[in-house]
Image: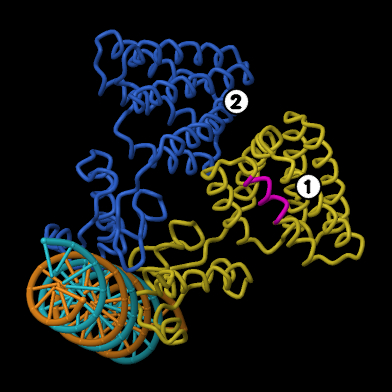
Chain colours: A blue, B yellow, C cyan, D orange
Amino acid sequence: MNAIRIAQPALYEEVAERLRQRIFAHELPPGTWIDEQALAEDYGISRTPLREALKVLASEGLVTLKPRRGCYVTELSASDIQEIFAIISMLEGRCAYEATEKGSAAAFARLEAIQDTLEKAATSGNIPAYFEANQQFHLELWQMSGNRWLLQVIQDLRKVLKLTRYQSLSLDGRLQKSMEEHRELLAAIKSKDPQLAEQVMKRHLIAGSEAMAKATSR
Amino acid sequence: MNAIRIAQPALYEEVAERLRQRIFAHELPPGTWIDEQALAEDYGISRTPLREALKVLASEGLVTLKPRRGCYVTELSASDIQEIFAIISMLEGRCAYEATEKGSAAAFARLEAIQDTLEKAATSGNIPAYFEANQQFHLELWQMSGNRWLLQVIQDLRKVLKLTRYQSLSLDGRLQKSMEEHRELLAAIKSKDPQLAEQVMKRHLIAGSEAMAKATSR
DNA sequence: GCGGATAATACTGTATCCATAATTATGAAT
DNA sequence: ATTCATAATTATGGATACAGTATTATCCGC
């Protein structure tokens, strides 16, 4: 009864994850052609698992497969970003609504703890720490809503958004603003007002979206 | 300047589409194991493009890949279906909202034409025709909303829903009910009331969802 | 010298082959 | 007879080899 092997992930999965990270880090910027042979050689693997990984990334929307032409990192237009943000704000708004309704006292406590971290990171201007806590905050809400598919869709869309270089947090006064919006959101949740929580969440995301729009148009 | 070849689709794409159809038709019911060798032989191709096709279907959620264990058609639980419907109703509700705001007179006319087809199919009890027109109606709304990503997400989710055998239309009085709901929806759109259109659309989809829930629990 | 056609090159797409892991069947021991 | 262990079979995962198509470079003609 030894659980030594918890089903080691297939090679193509690992490769897909490595590529995702490189795409998100803009080491492979949008529009670049992906050289299968070179990459396979670089990773010390054959083209087979690499190609399988590219298929996965393609249906995630991170790369675009042009038949007989090869594979390119997806380029997002400004309107793409706006459209995706519109959807995310809707979905996460619903998340906030359901989380407020269904959340347990323990979950509320976890949210407050994360908000503490958030405040500290914001006042000290520690963007990576804020980013991390921010992710946790949203993840906690997703889990509170208890809708796995909702979480799946949101995460897929957020993955695509990562294609763009400009993450709103690192812009002008967004860090401070974002923190205040979170504080407001938490208050709405604690006061058990799902509709208000939904509204605040939507505004929070739209605000981030608009900050990004300004940045990209510069 | 002869466009003889509009980039012939890759083999793995065709295979993926054929498999989708077989899964939707429940020729490959949920839970069944997909025998790569047998299928490849059956299609007269090698396992390589087939495996690539399975990777695509896996990230669409139609099949589940268990490392070193093979590939199985995804099984949806009743709660999965409910969760997905909740999301779809939200997204399509927004679609109806935006379509009402942005729709051109020509688009409104097309909707009316489709509604005509719908009514005829419903009164004659022609389910396949109704199904087709129904798809067109929703597609038209998606296009009117002008949000390509919204359309993408909705279609992805609807694909997953097709895994289940029970399509609400073929149930008790749903055909008639569905048609009436469509009529109501069209009225809301024509009267340029986006909020009402959104509400009606949401109710329309929830009604379909509940009919399905009853069917599956039998 | 410039433009078009043809040949060479390089990369994508598919097939075949091999290795490893999982499952099943068979045999032995209690 | 039942259970556990070991061996054999089968299927998945990965690598290599090959074919076909797109791109690019070179050469010939105008």
Which quadrant of the structure image shows residue A44?
Answer: bottom left
Is residue A76 in view? yes
Identified by mark 2, the residue type is: Tyr
Identified at 68% across, 49% down, the residue is B140
In percent of width and height, residue B26 lies at: 62, 71
Instruction: Please name the predominant secondary structure of the magenta segment in the image.
Output: helix
Identified by mark 1, the residue type is: Ala
Mark 2 highlights which residue? A97
Identified at 88% across, 60% down, the residue is B120
In percent of width and height, residue C1 lies at: 11, 61
A194 versus B59 height, above or below: above
Q: CA distance from mark 1 to mark 2?
A: 37 Å
Indicate whether residue A27 is drawn in magenta.
no
- Residue stretch rendered in magenta on the structure: B136-143
Q: Chain of mark 2?
A: A
In percent of width and height, residue A187 lies at: 52, 11
What label does residue A110 carry, if any? none
In percent of width and height, residue A167 lies at: 33, 28
